[in-house]
């Protein structure tokens, strides 16, 4: 490992996090909500210390090892989450543990919160929550690689570790150019979402906040009732569009912009993703209306569409109390959250591509029982998936299930009921922030013991960085040699 290089990268990441605080500090000054120092002081201190550390650790050595990459990504995320928690503490809104939980839920776009009534929170703090999700959506490290040309080392490894795409597809030969393209696409989606919400009739402050948390599929809202508070078809459709677009693999936008729209539209994962959302909307509409829910099929369709898009992308905005929809609808929506959106998007979960390949692998295993001599390569479209990739998908699924089980046991050790323990770990590992039962209710998270909250922040980090980037640091082999 190269501590000097790791510290240099962490200094740059933390400096970016500190600089971002000047935005809510400026808004606090304009709004007069009394939180200028709560943001300005940590922003100034972080910038000074991080800049000094960056200059002191600059090195002509451009080599970065795999261990360095994993440390930079994981410690970078922990660092910005810790820095992002400071304004919540200085403002008096919450204590250190809750503040770190809130900040990590923001940067990982989990959306879990200990704040029950956002309407009573200062506007600048609400804006900061939304900004943490927006920054976390594209990824602190990806933004760092894209906008900091002074740091050229390890760009390829950093990009791969951060994006954590199970089937990586480089968009350009130069990795920094790819990172910039991601940032441009993200910016375009943000601008488009803001315009759409303003045209739909949402107020400027609410529109800015909900745009930031929609494009990041984060789900923080300025209202206790989430999107239901606006009771507007136009607003709901604008947010549904934003969530669905943000759940797409960003590489497809690049291909479409380069005139290869056929390549993008014919992508198997993309088609499966749209099929899952459309199919779940129709199925839930039929099931709910048949059970007597709603006044009309149109009303039921409206709620089914929104919740399908929201939970399939892991955003977890709500327009209805879906936890009371009945056992079938509840479990079906939990399945959507577990699958998640496309790889290479801002969402979490297993990802559609893994779900598709796992289903095909299972079908092949059944076929092999009947035809044991058959050669059955795993294919996605015209592409044959290497056996090593098949092993990786299976390994990921096993670790995902094992973490869910172990996490449930650890939270249950705190005296939390089994259902709530599983729901909280499920919500954090899939970075949705919500699940069945009390999980997703701010009062539930607020009342958890401090050690349980710290554990859940760890599961948020695991989910955001797709397990292995974090777990590799816990192995003895990582620290040897």
Image: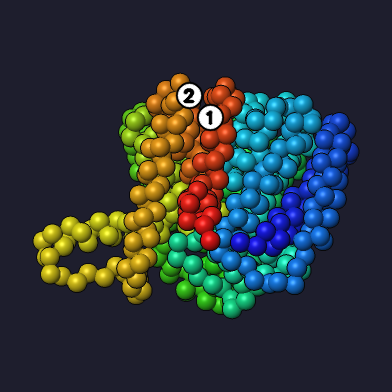
Question: Is the Cβ of the residue at disc 2 closer than 8 Å to that at disc 1?
Answer: yes
Q: Residue 319 appears at what percent x and percent y?
A: 54, 35
- Residue 452 is labelled as 1
Q: Is residue 410 left or right of residue 118?
A: left
For image coordinates 36% across by 74% down, the residue present is: 383
N-terminal of the two: label 2 or label 1? 2
Q: Is residue 129 left or right of residue 43?
A: left
Rendered image quadrant of residue 457: top right
> On screen, 48 above or below 100?
below
Task: Provide the residue designation for mark 2.
Answer: 414
Rendered image quadrant of residue 395: bottom left
Q: Residue 416 appears at what percent x and percent y?
A: 46, 23
- Dot 2: within a 10 Å radius of its alpha carbon, few (fewer than 14), some, or many (20 or more) residues? some
| Residue 417 in sight in this render | yes
Farthest front residue in view = 481
Nearer to us in this view, 254 or 363:
363
Q: Residue 413 appears at what percent x and percent y?
A: 44, 25
- Dot 1: within a 10 Å radius of its alpha carbon, few (fewer than 14), some, or many (20 or more) residues? many
Question: In the rendered view of the protein, which quadrant contains the N terminus?
Answer: bottom right
């Amino acid at each position: 490992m190269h501590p000097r290089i790791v510290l240099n990268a962490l200094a740059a990441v933390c400096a970016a996090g500190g600089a971002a605080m000047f935005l809510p500090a400026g808004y606090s000054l304009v709004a007069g909500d009394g939180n200028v120092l709560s943001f300005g002081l940590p922003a100034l201190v972080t910038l000074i210390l991080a800049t000094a550390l960056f200059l002191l650790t600059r090195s002509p050595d451009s080599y970065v090892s795999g261990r360095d990459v994993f440390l930079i990504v994981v410690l970078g995320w922990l660092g910005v989450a810790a820095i992002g928690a400071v304004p919540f503490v200085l403002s008096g809104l919450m204590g250190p543990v809750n503040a770190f939980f809130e900040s990590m839920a923001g940067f990982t776009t989990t959306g879990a919160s200990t704040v029950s009534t956002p309407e009573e929170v200062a506007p600048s703090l609400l804006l900061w929550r939304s900004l943490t999700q927006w920054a976390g959506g594209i990824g602190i490290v990806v933004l760092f690689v894209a906008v900091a040309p002074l740091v050229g080392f390890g760009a390829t490894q950093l990009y791969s570790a951060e994006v954590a795409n199970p089937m990586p597809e480089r968009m350009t030969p130069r990795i920094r150019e790819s990172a910039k393209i991601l940032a441009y696409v993200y910016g375009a989606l943000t601008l488009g979402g803001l315009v759409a919400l303003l045209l739909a009739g949402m107020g400027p402050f609410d529109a800015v906040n909900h745009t930031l948390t929609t494009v990041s599929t984060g789900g923080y809202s300025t209202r206790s009732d989430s999107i239901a508070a606006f009771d507007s078809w136009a607003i709901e459709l604008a947010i549904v569009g934003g969530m669905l677009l943000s759940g797409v693999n960003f590489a497809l936008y690049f291909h479409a912009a380069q005139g290869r729209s056929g390549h993008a539209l014919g992508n198997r994962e993309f088609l499966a993703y749209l099929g899952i959302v459309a199919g779940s909307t129709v199925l839930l509409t039929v099931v709910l209306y048949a059970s007597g829910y709603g006044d009309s099929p149109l009303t039921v369709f409206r709620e089914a569409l929104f919740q399908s898009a929201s939970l399939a992308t892991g955003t977890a905005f709500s327009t209805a109390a879906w936890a009371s929809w009945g056992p079938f609808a509840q479990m079906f929506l939990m399945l959507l959250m577990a699958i998640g959106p496309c790889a290479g998007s801002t969402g979490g979960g297993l990802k559609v591509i893994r779900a598709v390949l796992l289903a095909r692998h299972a079908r092949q295993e059944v076929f092999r029982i009947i035809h044991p001599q058959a050669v059955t390569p795993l294919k996605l479209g015209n592409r044959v998936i290497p056996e090593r990739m098949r092993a990786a998908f299976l390994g990921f699924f096993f670790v995902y299930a094992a973490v869910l089980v172990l996490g449930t046991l650890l939270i249950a050790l705190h005296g939390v009921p089994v259902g709530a323990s599983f729901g909280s770990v499920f919500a954090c590992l899939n970075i949705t922030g919500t699940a069945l039962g009390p999980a997703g209710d701010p009062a539930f998270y607020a009342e958890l013991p401090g050690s349980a909250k710290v554990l859940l922040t760890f599961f948020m980090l695991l989910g955001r960085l797709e397990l292995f980037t974090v777990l590799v640091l816990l192995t003895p082999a990582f620290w040897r040699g």
